[in-house]
Structures are given as structure tokens and as C-alpha cells.
Image: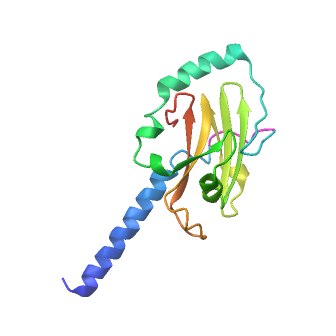
Amino acid sequence: MGPRGLTVLSIAGIAGLTFGIVGWNQRGIDAAAAPAPAASSSPAAATASSSGAAAAPANAQASAAAGPLLSSMPYASFAYLVWPGPLSANGKLALNRWKLAVTKQAGGITVQAAQDGQSMASVSHFYPGGAKVYILDSDLGNNAPGTTDEGLEVTNAQGQVLP
């Protein structure tokens, strides 16, 4: 194998690793899930329309289906809280290329997210038991169009990652 072959294999390996990271980071975004909500909110505020009786069974069911704690995931160090509450400086920087709307509903939250001019209506998902939304960005200094080091993660009140 000569230098050209080694170069081709290196490029293919880097491309494969990049696609793997992108897929892992964006696994919580489901384009075909829930219909768009009637009302949406900014990352700092949400509209509430919940009933306590309906929310309790949904929250119990969501906890059973939830994954590991976000804090135990390898990407936890570059997960920045973007909803609810005020954004940190790093959260604002990571959210730079995103449009995000979160609507609090009975039993969970609906998240609409789009990156780099995508339509938000086509990327909407309801998370039963959803309580917090994080943006993942492994390289805050590189927010140029076409970069693929970003994604979203939603957790329940216990901090478990939701599918």
C-alpha cells in the first residue's frame, strides 16, 4: 500500500467517524413523529397546558422507557441546557445555528428544532415526561455552516435521556 492508498483510507476513516458522531448526536430528533404544536415558545419560556391526573401516568411510563443519565454519557461535557431557564454563554454560542421551540404539554414537551435554514415544522417530536432540552456542541468555536458536531438531547426530570 502506497501513500495514496493510505491517504484514501485515512479520509474514509475520518468520514466514517464524522458520520457516526452526527448520527449519535441527532438520534433524539425524529422528523416523522408528532404533529406541529398549536403554540410554541422560546427556549426561555413555555406555555403550559397540563392536567395533573393525566401527567402522572405519562411521567411514570416515560421514566420506565428512559435511558441512562445524561451526566453518565461520554458527551455530557459538551451538553448545554437550552430549555427551560436562562441560557449560559456557551449555550447561546452552541445554539447559534439552531431554531428551537419548546412547548410544554400535558405529560411532556414538544420540541421543534431546525438547523441551518431547515423547516421547523418538519422536525417536531413529543417527549413524554420531557423536562429539559440540551444542545450538544463539541466545538463551540466552529459554528460555520456545514459543521456536524451538534445535536439535541431531551431528558426527564431525573436527568435520564429520552428516546
Q: Quadrant of the N terminus?
A: bottom left
Q: Is residue 35 magenta?
A: yes
The answer to whether residue 149 is left or right of residue 90 is left
Residue at x-position 76% and y-position 37%:
46
Q: Nearer the viewer, residue 10 or 150?
A: 150
Give the number of marks.
0
Q: Is residue 129 visible?
A: yes
Segment colored magenta = 33-38
Judge whether 84 appears above or below 6 on screen: above
Residue at x-position 63% and y-position 59%:
93
Judge whether 120 appears above or below 83 on screen: below
The answer to whether residue 142 is left or right of residue 101 is left
| Secondary structure mainly formed by the magenta segment | loop
Point out residue 161 in the picture as x, y percentages from the top left corner.
Answer: 50, 36
Point out residue 131 in the picture as x, y percentages from the top left corner.
Answer: 62, 32
Point out residue 44 in the picture as x, y percentages from the top left corner.
Answer: 73, 43
Extreme residue in the bottom direction: 3
Q: Nearer the viewer, residue 79 or 59?
A: 79
Q: Is residue 128 visible?
A: no
Point out residue 119 in the picture as x, y percentages from the top left corner.
Answer: 71, 57
The answer to whether residue 14 is left or right of residue 88 is left
Extreme residue in the top direction: 53
Q: Is residue 126 magenta?
A: no
Extreme residue in the left direction: 1
Extreme residue in the right direction: 39
